[in-house]
């Protein structure tokens, strides 16, 4: 299959030029370390493990596993994003463990999980965004207003932390995330909405900016997925999801003059008619939740999911490269296109094809496979370079310049979702697996989580 070849190409080039660094720089043919992982290395290795395994790239999976066994050093001392380490490293290791049953992945996940715990030592138990993995010191991002923590960061730990408790027998991980939920349940929500910035000291909102895209996104995703991963027993998460989605629909969902449905951002009651590429995961999420919506609501939410996915597809279709911009707007006569130079780039993000995959699995409408194939062709044409895949700086020109980055999420998510879009439904069935926000599959707790759950 085409996506398998793309994965092999992306992996082989990473291995040749950047193994042990975090990501490949495909134009300069070297590695990138970045500043999100606190001295941890091999982000692409850990992010790629399960995709290699699922695609049956056996030799490449063994290369990746060997690196984890021999070279993945957790005794590092640097500033890491709690969120990024959790979704990429913990999520990647857990998925690799559940798929293969190999102990090394489990022990690394648990060891790394322990290192994240000091971030929760705050007056409310809401973790801070940055942690030094050596000293355990933690603090808030300099750019986050008034020392606040970010909703999409502290709200995107639940799935992985429940598995860490399950596998270690140590309840501390589950306690930490259940406490986050308690704080969120207690705090008053303006119009039922969850703002993006919360103080870890007072437990109050710091700013009233609401977004289903960046800064908010995966918090909502983890509510519905917590319920699904609990085998539909965690009714508190389901209720929080249902209530949040109702408020989002009431206040943020709009239809453009040209008939495109989109989700705007909300700044203290004022709407910004902009949708980020990141927000495009919501088509898939709403479809996933629609399956279990109350009486008469299933159709409604499936329609909403299809409309949003269509809008995101339009953001691709209206560009010259057939890849979508980082953000697109619905104002001053514009529909589903970027209006600012700074928003025209595409960095190999997965969210649009992620929604195609869910929509395909839940409707079997062939247009989602067609749209996925359009994306494959565009990636091959505009993002493939001699030594890997690269993001592009402007989706509105057919001779785009490349950004020289092969993001690890391209291997973890974009290629995996595209591959699954063309697989049978029983490959990582949505009945048995939930995907974390980095597309790492975690098993549904039908009885108890078992390692080496079958991929079928
Ligand atoms: C990924 O790391 C995850 O999907 C995250 O939820 C959002 N950003 C990137 C991909 O765009």
Image (tube, rainbow, N blue to C red):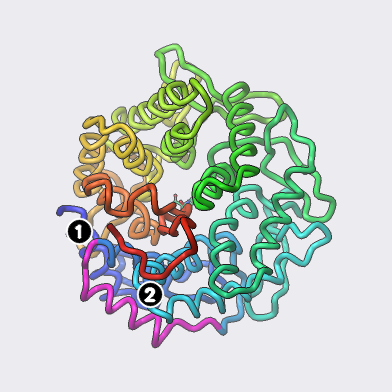
| Residue in the image at 74% along x and 52% along y | 148
Residue situated in front as seen by the camera: 346 or 138: 138
Left or right: 235 as drawn, with respect to 346 = right
How far across and down, in percent of the image, does residue 199 sit? 78, 50
| 56, above or below 308, in the image | below
| 387, above or below 289, in the image | below
Q: Main secondary structure of the magenta part?
A: helix
Instruction: Check residue 358 for magenta coloring.
Output: no
* Residue under pointer 2: 101
For mark 2, give the secondary structure. loop
| Residue 423 appears anywhere in the view | yes
* Residue under pointer 1: 4
How far across and down, in percent of the image, does residue 151 sit? 65, 47
How far across and down, in percent of the image, does residue 134 sit? 64, 80
| Residue in the image at 53% along x and 81% along y | 74
Residue situated in front as seen by the camera: 289 or 108: 289
Q: Earlier in the sequence, mark 1 or mark 2?
A: 1
In the current view of this chain or complex, which residue is farthest to the top? 257
Q: Quadrant of the C terminus?
A: bottom left
Left or right: 186 as drawn, with respect to 401 = right
| Residue in the image at 84% along x and 51% along y | 202
Tell me the quarter of the picture where residue 3 sits.
Answer: bottom left
| 287, above or below 86, in the image | above
Which mark's residue is nearer the viewer, 1 or 2?
A: 2
Instruction: Check residue 72 for magenta coloring.
Output: yes
User: Which segment is the magenta one?
Assistant: 55-74
| Residue in the image at 30% along x and 60% along y | 455
**Mark 1 near mark 2, Cβ–Cβ under 8 Å?**
no
């Amino acid at each position: 299959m085409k996506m398998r070849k793309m994965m092999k190409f992306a992996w082989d080039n990473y291995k040749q030029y950047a193994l042990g660094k975090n990501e490949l720089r495909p134009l300069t043919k070297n590695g990138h370390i970045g500043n999100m992982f606190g001295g941890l290395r091999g982000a692409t290795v850990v992010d790629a493990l399960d995709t290699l395994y699922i695609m049956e790239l056996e030799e490449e999976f063994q290369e990746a596993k060997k690196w984890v066994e021999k070279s993945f050093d957790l005794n590092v001392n640097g500033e890491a994003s709690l969120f990024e380490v959790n979704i990429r490293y913990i999520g990647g290791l857990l998925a690799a463990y559940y798929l293969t049953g190999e102990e090394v992945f489990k022990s690394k996940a648990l060891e790394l999980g322990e290192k994240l715990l000091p971030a929760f030592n705050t007056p409310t138990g809401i973790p801070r965004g940055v942690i030094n993995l050596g000293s355990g010191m933690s603090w808030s991002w300099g750019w986050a207003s008034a020392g606040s923590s970010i909703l999409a960061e502290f709200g995107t730990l639940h799935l992985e932390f429940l598995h860490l408790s399950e596998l270690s027998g140590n309840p501390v991980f589950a306690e930490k995330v259940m406490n986050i939920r308690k704080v969120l349940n207690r705090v008053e929500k303006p119009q039922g909405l969850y703002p993006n910035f919360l103080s870890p000291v007072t437990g109050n909102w710091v700013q009233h900016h609401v977004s289903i895209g960046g800064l908010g996104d995966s918090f909502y995703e983890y509510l519905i997925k917590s319920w699904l991963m609990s085998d539909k027993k965690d009714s508190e998460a389901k209720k929080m999801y249902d209530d949040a989605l109702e408020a989002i629909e009431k206040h943020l969902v709009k239809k453009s003059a040209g008939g495109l449905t989109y989700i705007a951002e909300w700044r203290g009651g004022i709407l910004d008619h902009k949708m980020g590429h990141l927000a495009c995961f919501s088509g898939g999420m709403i479809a996933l939740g629609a399956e279990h919506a109350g009486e008469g609501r299933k159709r409604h939410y499936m329609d909403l999911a299809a409309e949003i996915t269509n809008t995101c597809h339009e953001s691709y279709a209206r560009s010259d490269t057939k890849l979508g911009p980082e953000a697109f707007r619905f104002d001053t006569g514009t529909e589903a296109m970027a209006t600012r130079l700074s928003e025209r780039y595409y960095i190999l993000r997965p969210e649009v094809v992620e929604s195609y995959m869910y929509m395909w699995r839940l409707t079997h409408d062939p247009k989602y496979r067609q749209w996925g194939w359009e994306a494959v062709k565009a990636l091959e044409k505009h993002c493939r370079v001699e030594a890997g895949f690269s993001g592009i700086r402007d989706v509105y020109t057919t001779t785009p310049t490349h950004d020289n980055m092969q993001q690890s999420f391209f291997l973890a998510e974009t290629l995996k979702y595209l591959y699954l879009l063309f697989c049978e439904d029983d490959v990582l069935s949505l009945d048995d697996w939930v995907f974390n926000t980095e597309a790492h599959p975690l098993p549904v707790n039908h009885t108890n989580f078992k390692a080496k759950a079958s991929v079928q």
